[in-house]
Each structure stands twice: as structure tokens, then as C-alpha cells.
Image (cartoon, rainbow, N blue to C red):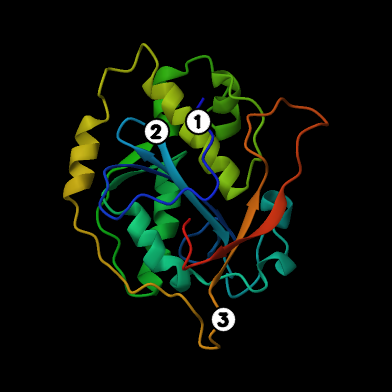
Amino acid sequence: MLPRPTPGMPAAPQGDRGFAVVDVEATGRSPWRHRVVEIAVVLLDERLRPEGEFATLLDPLGPVGPTHVHRIRQADVEGAPRFREIAPRLLELLAGRVLVGHHVSCDHAFLDREFARIGVPLPPVPLLCTMRLAREHLPQARGHGLAACVEAAGLGWYPAHTALGDARVTAELLLHCLGAPSCPPDDWAGPLREAARVPWPRLGRARSRPSGTAVPLLRRETSYGPWLPGPQAPEVVLTKAGAMSSTA
């Protein structure tokens, strides 16, 4: 299990090498037609030690989509930042890192389209997919979805379909798979070297809106698990996690 992140832990500076475990919740399945409505990033260093977290709901400038799946209501995104407002911070967090996700090509596609909408081409960042890793190193899994892989790895309950909950448990799954006896030592060294060489664009940080108010971050989370299944699982709560000028 990863150590619990320290509250207020600052994110690693731009250009640090390591992993960025990403999860997005979206208003639908198509990166071309739908928008990201929640994003979370869990930062790990080269030795898979936690460095920081970033998470917020986003205003998709339209309907939030399948509330029955992601449990995000239209009222939840009122006052949330737009993607372009967090884009500078997101570029800082991803720079120099391997992008990790469960079915990472999907998360990458949504990020690529969101950046394209604001005229920023996402560079060819190396990808590492925990779904692929689970196929190789979790043969006992009943399926290859995140829930089935988490169950097979014995990682406990997590708040599924919340971006931060999925990103946290995906980071745990990455650690589990890369530590499996069937995984070659330093199997991830090549992608880390490749990620460190990728040039990343920079954008000026958006610290306030035209009204002069700070850009908010709205974060859905539970207390850090893992938790056993059952009626005692903690509820997901919506919190204000400061503003863009603060640490992640």
C-alpha cells in the first residue's frame, strides 16, 4: 500500500521525473463530443513514492452527463473551474512524467482533446496502462476492469467513478503490478527516460477570474483508504480545496 499523502503536500516541481497517475470523469464516452467534468492526478516519483495530488470538478459548459455513473450533479459543478483555467497547472504536473491510467488511452484521449480545444498540442508523452499490466501480472482477475483488478490485488474498497478515488487506487495497482515476481526489475526505466526528454509547453498560471476572484478547486473525496466493502464505507464529500494559487 502507498503511504498516505500528507495534507497540503505540494506537488513536485515542473520537470521532475516519475509517474502521473491520471483519471478523468466525462460527460460521455466520446472525447470529440463530450467534455471532462472531473480530473485527478496522483504524482509518484521514480521509485513509486507519493509526491502529491491534484483533483477538481470542472465546469463542462453544458450537461454533466451520466450522473447515475459518476454521481456528479449539475449543481456540483456550479462555480467549478473550466478546463482552460486549470490547464497551466496540469501541464506543470504532467511535465517530465510517464502518464499512467487504467485503460490509459481513454484518459489520454480526453486530455488531448481538452488541450486541443484551447490550442495547446499535447506532446507525445509515454503511456503506461495498468489494465495491460494486470493482464500480465494478475492472471487471477475475473476481468480487466478497474474494480476486478483491484479485487484480485486485494486492495479493498475504493470510491469508484470518482476521479481521485480511481486515480489513488490505480496508483496502488501500479505498485502492486510492478512489484509482482512476474514483472522484470526496472521494467519501467525506459519510459521514465523517454518522458524526461519530452519538451512540454508552458502556459501562464490563471490565478484569478476577470471578476478578480480566485479560481476555485472543487474536490470530491473520502478519507484515504483502503476500506473493506460494506455499510461502513465512508461517503464521498464535496470540498473546496483552495484556489489555483495554492499547492495541489
Distance between mark 1 and mark 2 Cα atoms: 8 Å
Identify which residue is drawn at 63% across, 29% down: 226
Instruction: Determine if residue 145 is in view.
Output: yes
Rounded to the nearest whole Å, what is the CA distance between mark 1 and mark 3?
Answer: 35 Å
Counting residues from the N terminus, which is met first, the one under dot 1 or under dot 3? 1
Marks 3/2 in contact by CB < 8 Å: the verdict is: no
Image x and y of residue 131, in percent? 45, 32
Q: Quadrant of residue 156?
A: top right
- Outermost residue, top side: 181
Q: Is residue 42 visible?
A: no
* Residue 10: percent from left, percent from top: 43, 51
Which circle marks residue 213 in the picture? Answer: 3
- Which mark is on residue 3? 1
Residue at 20% x, 33% y is 190
Kind of residue sitting beneath label 3: Thr
Mark 1 touches mark 2? (CB < 8 Å): yes
Pick whichever, 8 or 191, lies toward us: 8
Mark 3: secondary structure: loop
Q: Identify which amino acid the numbered label 1 is placed on.
A: Pro
Circle number at residue 195: none
* Left or right, residue 134 beside residue 185: right
Residue holding disc 2: 49
Residue found at x 74% / y 69%: 75
Mark 2 falls on what kind of element? loop
Q: Are marks 1 and 3 in contact (CB under 8 Å)?
A: no
Q: Residues within 10 Å of mark 2 (few under 14, many from 20)?
A: some
Which numbered disc, 3 or 2, marks the residue that appears first in the sequence? 2
Residue type marked 2? Arg
Q: Position of residue 132 (x, y in %)?
A: 40, 30
